[in-house]
Structures are given as structure tokens and as C-alpha cells.
Amino acid sequence: MNNKNTLSTYYVLPYIIFSVLFILLPLFVVLYYGFTDRTGHLSLANFIHFFTNSRTIGTFFYSVVIAFLTTLFCLLLAYPIAYILAKGVYRGRHSFLLVFVLPMWINFTLRVTALKEILTYFEGNIAMHPFFNTIICMVYDFLPFMILPIFNSIVKLDDSLIEAGYDLGATKFQTFVKVIIPLTIPGIVSGVTMVFLPAMTNYVVLDMVYNSTYIMGSLIGSYFSSYDWNNGSIISAVLLIVIGLMTIISNHLINNKKW
Amino acid sequence: MRYLNKINSCILISTIVGMSLMSGCASSSDVTVLRVANWEEYIDMGDWDEDEIIELEDGSTVFGEDDLMSEFEDWYYETHHKKIKVEYSCFGTNEELYNQLTLGSVYDLVCPSEYMIMKLLHEDELLPYDESFFDKSKEENYYIRGVSNYIDNVYNELSIDGKVLHDHTAGYMWGTLGIVYNPEYVDEEDASHWNILLNDKYKRQITVKDSVRDAYFAALAIKNYDLITSEEFINAPDYHDRLTEVLNATDQSTVDAAQEVLTRIKENVYSFETDAGKADMVTGKVVANQQWSGDGAYTIEQAMDDDLELRYATPEECTNLWFDGWVMLKRGMQDDPEKKEAAQAFVNFLSRPDNVIRNMYYIGYTSVISGGKDDMIYEYAKYQCEGEEEEVDNDDVYSEADQGMEEGDESPQGDDTDDEAGQTVLDSRYDLSVLQNSGQHSEGDRQGGLRAYPLGYFFGNGSEDDDAYTLYVEPGTGQEALLESRYPLIEIMDRAVVMDYFDEKGNEAINRMWTNVRCFDLKNILLGR
């Protein structure tokens, strides 16, 4: 028994080293650069600049709008799909799930390139609707990340709870809203976190569909390529804060059964 | 638990492999390691197909068997009897290279663009080449014996903090900045002005480089159009210096004006692109794009495979003369004479005419090496001008030109003027209409309908005989378009300026301007725009 314990301590060691080297340390580097100026002195100037400049805050706003719409449409599409896949009365639902998840195995630039050709076929010059196309490509790109967690939470759903709802006189709609949705909140929340934040920074999709307006990711990149580590880092730090807030809110949602 | 075991053994194995690799490198101390960083896809990697062999008119052949790095290692061992290992890595942009260097990557020999060379020179990071490297009498000094006089002079004129670029740089590839366009949809006249980026006739059908400096250059050309095209400006004795000054201005009012132009450009163009423009041009998604000449040639060649005709125009106001060059880094070299010798030998090896041709073939860009007394590279340029059908159709012209060359010994700058046929060829070269109205040629107005394309300024040595370096190409063909993108004419070079490395203040202003152009402005919503 003892022997096994010491062994597992050894097993943990690589992961501790990994987390320190690749998670904690970079985090401190980001925070250090974010809150210092070019000469290395502590300063809030970058932070203030980010929130007072109408263009950096405008970029934040633009990214949030893109991420919000992407998440919304992903959710609206993914929930019914996941529900049908999980609850449908047919054999081999896992192979059907595979069909929806399969695109994840293909490099996303390849998928977006293909989608671009399809959009060109329908729209003609796709540079005319950069915003619209961005949302379409983002939704397409992130959909599997929304389907999977929701599917998992619906699969785990206890059917007896739904039956209990009907037994107590709830209509189908009421059962859905009051029983099924609350019970699948953890899946929805993890789906949303998996889509919202990457969508805020995934500038490659914007580049590929000829949207020349920056989002957070491209702004960080442009600061870094002009050797401005400080202003680039503060944006990363702001995104960290957003992640932090979202994690707190989602934990609250998952644990708070009273929803 | 089995799962964990698997991962763990993976980590173990990779650690062991990694360690053994590292020790493998360290143990062989008699081998000099040369750490080279170059642009992606910017050196011949060999492995050509049999049918890719290049057979020049003078009978010599060029074939890329192995990559040039390992061929250099063999060559160095044969000629210098020393073992060398080239550690080759790539970068995507100048800024990426600079960031790598500041974050601790150590290289010995790197190949950035002119402004990054100036920046590194300004920061005292570069080692000058040895005097012996510039000794033309030595057979193995392929670089200095082969570099085009014209380009060499440009390097001599560029300096920063009193340090001349020439002493620290061995050029590699060079070119201009221009517009690749599809003549089916775009007028040549439109494409010959930077203003095309604002032309709403081509709304959302043109791409611009997603690079601050290239976009800024175009914006300054548009903003200063009236000034730089005025008679008085062009005829001023210090025209070129003044043009350089105008296109390198970074004062706040200029930057603000450029921001205004670029904001309008952003609303009018298809997109700012980093790499997609070439493919979009070939697939027909866009009808024109701002492009470096080398990529322009690449695009035109790609389109030719699809039977699509594209052309390259250098705007009439001005163009940006760019080049990439090999520079030795102080921090990497550490005053190691072995390394320095190897680095200089590497540059010379790359400048050997056959290797130059291999690189030009593989990369599609134009080398700064003209070959000096060796005409192999000129022969290659001639070879590139020949389309498959033209060879038969216009036999008479080639024989005429050849005759002149044959009589003038091995090199074409021999006295072919004595020859009557050569005389006619020469005369037609001075016929300006030949150069300007290449699109609307009529039968018989010049040598079998071929356009004379004088490149003496690049291939020659500054003497009168340079006129012999004139290529002939059929107007309206892909070969002509390729030639125009590969080798600009001298009158284009007169309006080509090098964009300096801007000082920190200027750089900051331009980067801020660029962010302003690209970012969504919250004021737009608040003010209801």
C-alpha cells in the first residue's frame, strides 16, 4: 500500500513540473509585462490605456459581440442536435455523434478554407459581408465544442426525473424548461466557456474570411510584432480576468441547484 | 492506471531521446556549427524531378540534387578540409526574427530585410565582413565577383550611424513593390498608380499586404501624388534624395494623413492579407493585389499553369526597393574565426552562379547576383524569356542576337556593334515606343515583333558595352509579365527608394496609426456612425 503511494507521488511530479513551467510561470510573465512599462517599472499606464482608448476598448467590444453571437448560435444549434442524438430512439447514436464531431479531426484552417469556397459560391464576393461570414465560420468551427459537453450531460440525464415531471402534471414544454434545462446546465456552461473565450481571440478565422478589423487576438499579435510586450500582455491579462469571472459564474451556476 | 503508465513512458522515452540527441551534438567538437536563420521557403531544397533540369543556351546545365545546406557542408569539406554542420531554421517575418533574437535565440548568420539589417546595425549587433571577402581577385569570392554593380552601389550608399551597409551585408534577393493585376478586368493605366487601392471601380476586389510598412508606403505615395509627380519635382537634380525623404517621413502630420488614406483603403479593398493574396489572385477572387515583385512572379507563374494571364505593374509615382541580405551576428559568432570563415564561405557558396540559378528557380525571386564576368545568370534570364512556342516562331531574331554575341567572344559585352545585324538590334533598343507601347505592337515594327528589354544596368559593369545585355521577349505573353516582375527596367529603378529603418518614435507613431486603422472604434457607435 505504502509502496503504491510513493509511486503515485512520483507520477504526479511530471505534472507539477509541467504546470509550473507551462501554466504558472507564463502567467506571471504576462502579469509582469502587463503591469510594467518599457523600462520595467511598475505602472498602470497600459491598463488605463486599454480602458480609455476608444479603439482598444472598441476592439474588446467587437470581440465580445463576435464571441457572443458565435456562442448564441452554437448553443441554439447544438442543443437540439445533442438532445436528438442523446435521446433519439435509434441504434448507434454514437456513430451519429461521430458525424458531428468528426470535423474536429480535420485541421480547422482546412475546414474554413472549404467553407470559404462554399460561401463564395453563394455570395459571390465574400469580402462584401465580412462580419456575417465571420460569424458563420466561427459557428461552424466551434459547433463540436458545444455539442460534446451538452450531449454528455443529456446522456447522463435520469429519465425517471423527466417522467416524474409528467406525472406531476407538467406539460412537455414545462418539463423541458423546468427539468431538462436545469439538469443540463453544467453541459451548457462548459460548452459556453469552450466557445466564448476562444471565439474572442481566434483571429485566424477573421483573417481567412477577409475581415480586416482586429479582434483581441490580432491586437495582441500586432503589439507583439511591434515589440510592445507591455500593451500586448495587458490585453492577455484582461482576457485572464474575463476567464476568471466566467469560471466563477459558471461554478456558481453548476453548484447552485436552485437556478 | 495503464493509461497513466503509457503517458509516463512516453515522457521518459522522449526525454531519453532528447538527451541523447543533445549529447550527440556536444560530443563532436571538431565540427564547426553554423546556425543559419532564413525565411521560409527561401533556399533550394533540391530533390528536383528529372525533367526540371535547366539547360542553358551555352550548354551548361543546372540541377538541384540535394538541399544547398548539405551540399555546402560537402563542398566546404572538399575545399577547406574542415567539417561544418549547418543548423538551419526559419522565420516568418522580420519582427519574428527580431523577437527571437531578443528572447535569446542565438544565430550566426541570418537573412533579414534591409530595414531590419539597419535596425540590427544601429543596435551594434552585426559583424562586418572581412576585407578578404571583398577581394575580387580571389576565385572563391563568388559574392563580390558576382554581385550586380548596381545593387552593390545601393549598398554603398546606405548607412546608419556612419556604418555603411555594404560592409556588413551580403545581398540575397531583391525586388520592388507593385501591383499584380488581371488585365481582363483591370486597365494597365489604373494598375500603374497606387491610387488603384482607392478606386471604387474595383471595390472589394483588391488586396493589400497586411504589413505596416508596405501599406504605409502606398498611403504616402497616394497622399503625395501631386508633389512627387510634378514636373518640378521630377526634374530637380536631387530628385531621388527628395523622393526618398518624402517616402520616409514619419512626422505626426504625415502619419495622421496616412491613417486617413489607409482607413479609406480599408473600406475599399478586399482585405489586408498576409499570404492568401497570391492564391486569391489565381483563383480569381480578386483582380489585383499589392505584392512584392518576387511573389508577383510566383503568382504570374502559378496563373500561367491555369492559363490565366496576370501582369505586374510598378506604379509610376514610386516604388519601394527592397532586398534581403545575409548578416553575421556578433552574439552568435563570438569572434570565432572558424565560424566567420564558414559563414562567409556559405554566402559565397550561395552566390556561385549555378546555386544562384537553383535558388531563383526554386524560390521564384530575383537574386542580387548578376554573375559579374560569368554570364550564366544572364543566360538563365534569357532562358526564362523563352516561351515554348516562341522558340520556333521567332528563330530569326534569336539568331540575329546570337550572331552578335558569338562574334564578341564568350561574353555578350563584346563588340557586337561592328556587326550589321547587331546594329539593328541596338537601334531598336533605343526606340522608346518599343518600351512603352508594348501592348499595342504591330507586325514588323521591330525585331520580329519582339520587345527589347535592356538590363545593362543590372548585368553590366557600367561601360558602354552594357547595351549588349538586352533581352528579347514577345509582348503580351506570360514571359513578358514574368520578366517585368523579375527585372525592373532602369527607369523604374530611378523612382525606386529604399525605406529606412524608422527611429523608435517614428516606429511607435506608425504602429499606433496601424492599430487605429485596424481596430473597431467605439466612437463609431457612440456617435451613431
Image (tube, helix red, strand yellow):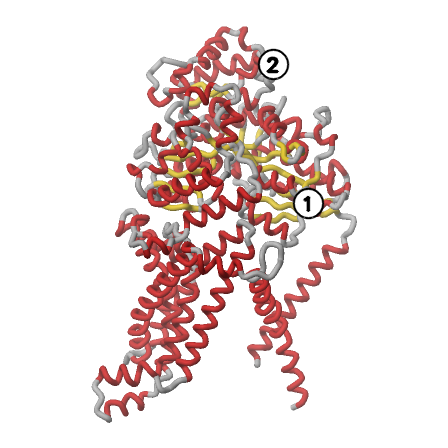
- The residue labelled by disc 2 is B409
Chain letter belonging to callout 2: B
The image position of residue B180, as x and y in percent, is: 40, 35
* Marker disc for residue B108: 1
Q: Is residue A223 above or below residue A66?
A: above
Judge whether residue B323 can be spotted in this image: yes
Chain letter belonging to callout 1: B
Q: Residue at x 48, y 41 (%)?
A: B252
In front: label 2 or label 1: 1
The image position of residue B192, as x and y in percent, is: 38, 29
Q: Residue at x 77, y 41 (%)?
A: B337
Residues at marks 2 and 1, CA–CA distance in whole angstroms: 42 Å
Q: Amino acid at mark 1?
A: Asp
**Left or right: A162 with respect to B377?**
left
Q: Residue at x 29, y 88 (%)?
A: A162
**Camera-side residue: B426 or A57?**
A57
Mark found first going from the N terminus, 2 or 1: 1
Q: Amino acid at mark 2?
A: Asp
Query: Which quadrant of the view contains residue A20?
Result: bottom right
- Classify mark 1: helix, strand or loop: loop
